[in-house]
Image (tube, rainbow, N blue to C red):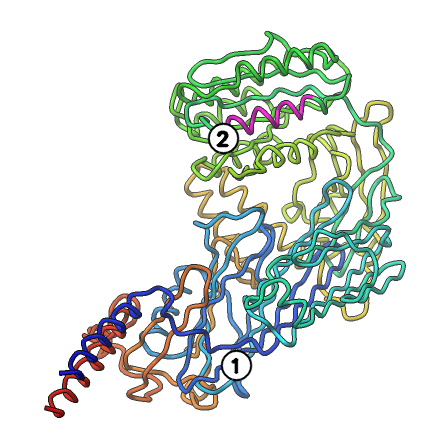
Amino acid sequence: MTLRLISIGLFAVINVLCSCDNAVIMPRVQIASMHVESKIHARMARVLVTTQMKNFANQSLETQFTFQLPDTAFISNFTMSVGDKSITAIVKEKKEANKIYEQSKQLGVSAAKIDRQDDTPNREMKIFTVSVNVAAESKAVFKLQYHELLSRKFGYYKQRISFQPRQIVHDLVFRAKIFEQEGINTFHYTLPGSNTTETSSNELTVVKASENTRELYFKPTVDYQKAQNISKGISGEVVLIYDVEHSNVGGIILQENEYFVHYLAPSGFTVLNKNIIFVIDISGSMQGLKMEQTRLAMLSILDQLHPGDYFNILLFDNNIQEWFSEPMLATLTNVNLAKIFVHDKVHARGGTDINSGLLRGVTLLDTTQSLGGTKGNIIVFLTDGRPTAGITNTKSIRLGVTAANKHKFSIFSLGFGFDVDMPFLKALSWENGGFARRIYEESDASRQLESFYKELENPTLIDVKIDYPNNAVELSSLTSTRFPQYFKGSELIIVGKINDHFQSQLDAHVQGQGSVTNLDTNINSTALKVGNIMESSIIEKMWAYMKINDLLKDIALTDDDDMKMILRNKTLKLSLKYNFVTPLTSMIVSETLLPRKIAYDHVELGVAPSRGRKTKFRSKPGRVVHSQSFNIAHRPYPDTNALSSDLDKHGIRKDSNSGSINQIRLATVYCVFFLLQFLSYCSR
């Protein structure tokens, strides 16, 4: 009787434990080492993350990594080494990569796929996931490489490198080397978990400097990692910030083989006054925190207007309300009147007539431009939703606004939150000489708006044009060579391909209108200097990188299905040629992509294909995911047809014991319960 009571009590305890989210098998795949290496050459960064994993369990485990990359980065390589074999991932069109991955799962062979998670937006970062399998009692090395073109804002280049191993790592190292042709005049950095800006070596880092280079070495101790988090260690970013000498008003052209890049950051020009219209969505969906943050940001931005600026504020829901019928000079009196208007009138109500709001903004700016003078012409458009009043077809809105604008003014769009139609805002801004950004609906949203405005605050040139000799370059290879405005502290970048027959030094004619003096100069190219250990063919990769981005913009802008397909094929061809993971491609690694001899040698690869049950142990969000495979038959390539009828869409056998943690928990409970019942019976 006592044993029977014990068995019932134990059954209850086990049942509670098995239903508890914390009753998850702890990770047994450990990171033995993680080395992150960044090399920056001519603004193009190549980052290599090398991670060695160890599995001490007696069964294979699948670990899922989630990692963040900057929005402008492209993954360019992924290698998995197990035992003495290495498998290098290849870039495929998304559909084909998904097919290979699903087939690999059905066959039970080792595979991994890197995909962008477009449904999980993050601040200027994109999120990728990759699942890798580590064999029982073995180690594996994973190498992930990506490229990023660094943009210049506020007078410097910034590189953000995510540093989140999610556990204490005894061999954790970060190395960076910057090599710039013009010479480096500014450099500082911050470490994960710290807001302190450093410029030289300290107890954790070593910094080396020369005229053209900066090197950083950072090896956080175990104690330092535990101080960040006792179990997960470091979670943050290494941020590198630097700038180069910009002594040549026409910029610098670097030439490598048949490719060139032209960097243009003209300095010494007086800041232009602006004609600026703020077009603000005050529809009902802006109610609450969004509206409050918009008011606070506008009050701050009004204080930053220059005395010579002309400005106006236009509010729209399903109606339009203007501060004044024409733009006003930014005198102290007018700025204070505008603040009263913002405080009293910026309140959410009504529908969303985007078309009427933007067309009226263009008309107002036309009125201001008639006053004459060389000025920056800007529309700042802020919305959180989609058009619900007036013309609601976004294609019609774009066509109408672009036709009315006639490429005279730059439209910069701000999308508030995650419900906004960002593809529409991006296309609208690209067509009208601006760009679109997402404002994240968080406590610092007003600061995000202020930071955005600072990028537009100081135009120094308008109508910037760069011309290259027609016989020297392939015109179709060029990225954009016309820019409505140049803003202080930024940089214009043009890349292209030189004609095969052209043997001379490439030159360019650069023009732009300033307030006092105009930009009108010629510049010649120089041969690219390749610093030791820096990557070769960097200009060619940069050309492919920028050309892909331009083609992706063109795809978003065109409404012609045939042209969209032509552009898509060009983009796909470049993505595959240069091994870049773009919105059209995925990176896939699988034993099925290797010669059959290697795939059969699954013992040496350290991964045993399985036709048996596959049980996934899923932890809470953000934790590592593990999968244990119970190998019943070790056949390298089982008959796909024979298997397919017994597999679900995830490649898991559809038997009564497969699939979920709940089934395994329940099976464990029943086994323990019946064992105790049997013992109880035997004791009577």
Rendered image: mark on residue 54: 1
Residue 675, located in which quarter of the rendered image?
bottom left
Q: Quick one: which residue is furthest to the front in this view?
A: 2
Numbered range of the magenta stretch: 290-302
Residue 220, located in which quarter of the rendered image?
bottom right
Rendered image: mark on residue 289: 2
Number of numbered labels in the structure image? 2
In front of the other: 619 or 557: 619
Q: Kindly identify the residue that appears in the image at 66 percent across and 26 percent down.
A: 300
Secondary-structure class at tag 1: strand
Q: Is residue 330 magenta?
A: no
Q: Is residue 162 above or below residue 493?
A: below
Which of labels 2 and 1 is toward the front?
2
Q: Kindly identify the residue that appears in the image at 20 percent across and 80 percent down.
A: 7
Q: Kindly identify the residue that appears in the image at 56 percent across and 46 percent down.
A: 123
Q: Amino acid at mark 1?
A: Lys
Secondary-structure class at tag 2: helix
Q: Is residue 301 magenta?
A: yes
Label 1: few (<14), some (14–19) or many (≥20) C-alpha neighbours in 10 Å: many
In front of the other: 44 or 545: 44
